[in-house]
Image (cartoon, helix red, strand yellow):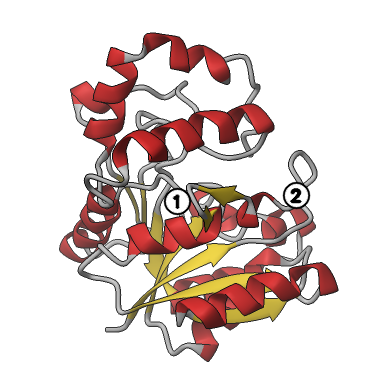
Amino acid sequence: MTTIATIEARMTSSRLPGKVLMPCQGQPILALMVERLRFVPSLDGIVVATTLNAADDPVERLCKDLGIGCWRGSEDDVMARVLDAATAHKADVIVELTGDCPLIDPAIVETCISRYFETGVDYLSNVMERGFPIGMDTQVFATAILADAASRTVDPVDHEHVSLFIYRHPELYRLANVAALPHQRDPELRLTLDTAQDFQLIDKIFAALRQGNPRFSLDDILSLLTANADWRKINDHVAHRYV
């Protein structure tokens, strides 16, 4: 079974255009996310699913520089884009991630992959029941399951959100959720990149933790924020856009 992480990333974000390539501690944000995913032992590869827009040419160039896959497809039909990316890279299992999660904890991704194989479900995530901070979002499912879902719906909303149809239809698919450990529960904490304020917090976290340990964990981040409680105020007013 080939397990591939797909990262949805594009330059035309409505709230913070160009965010996936914003420089952070001398690296593009997307490169920092890839660096962290390379610490996930169960991943056989990483592919960025971007669009055909000319604005995303730099995303493709960065993927080549990083030595990872890149697939370019529809901007609006993200379900098809991810499915085609996985198929082109011969993925049996997709670990679906988005490019606005550069602080993703490799250990949490690994836990989700392990639980997926242990449980034998069709779809597993840590977001059906939110407990982890926003930005730790991980979804795991077979490429065949995504292909099945794509064949069952033509709703543009389903096709915009990749796995939405799967987890909204428990009568069709077996689902499982990975819950946050009690000390990790902080579902309102924004560790995602959607605004300039989010970037300010993310940059501070990378500056404080990456040099000493590039595979720093969510626990490390939470300890850092406990020691610097005022940092939470940087983006705690930002409203998150849930599906």
Tell me if residue 203 comes above or below residue 232 in the rendering.
below
Per the rendering, the mark at residue 13 is 2
User: Which residue occupies the foreground of this view, 168 or 141?
Assistant: 141
Count of labels in the image: 2
Task: Name the residue that disc number 1 marks.
Answer: 170
Seen in the picture, residue 162 relative to 93 is either above or below; the reply is above
Q: Position of residue 243 (x, y in %)?
A: 64, 39
Say whether residue 89 is visible.
yes
In depth, the one of 242 and 49 nearer the eye is 49
Local secondary structure at mark 2: loop
Most extreme residue toward the right is 54
Q: Look at label 1 and name its amino acid.
A: Pro
The foreground one among 177 and 153 is 177
The disc placed on residue 50 is none
Residue drawn at x 40%, y 33% as measured from the top left? 205
How busy is the neighbourhood of tag 1: few (under 14 within 10 Å), some, or many (20 plus)?
few
Query: Do tag 2 and tag 1 residues touch (Cβ < 8 Å)?
Result: no
Q: Position of residue 169 (x, y in %)?
A: 52, 52
Residue visible at 77% across and 66% down in the picture: 75
Rendering coords of residue 40 (x, y %): 25, 63
Q: Position of residue 226 (x, y in %)?
A: 29, 14
Q: For mark 1, give the secondary structure.
A: loop
Location of the N terminus by quadrant is bottom left
Amino acid, disc 2: Ser
User: Could you say which quadrant of the image residue 32 lies in?
Assistant: bottom left
Q: Residue at x 60, y 71 (%)?
A: 49
Q: Is residue 31 left or right of residue 211?
A: right
Q: Is residue 80 visible?
A: no
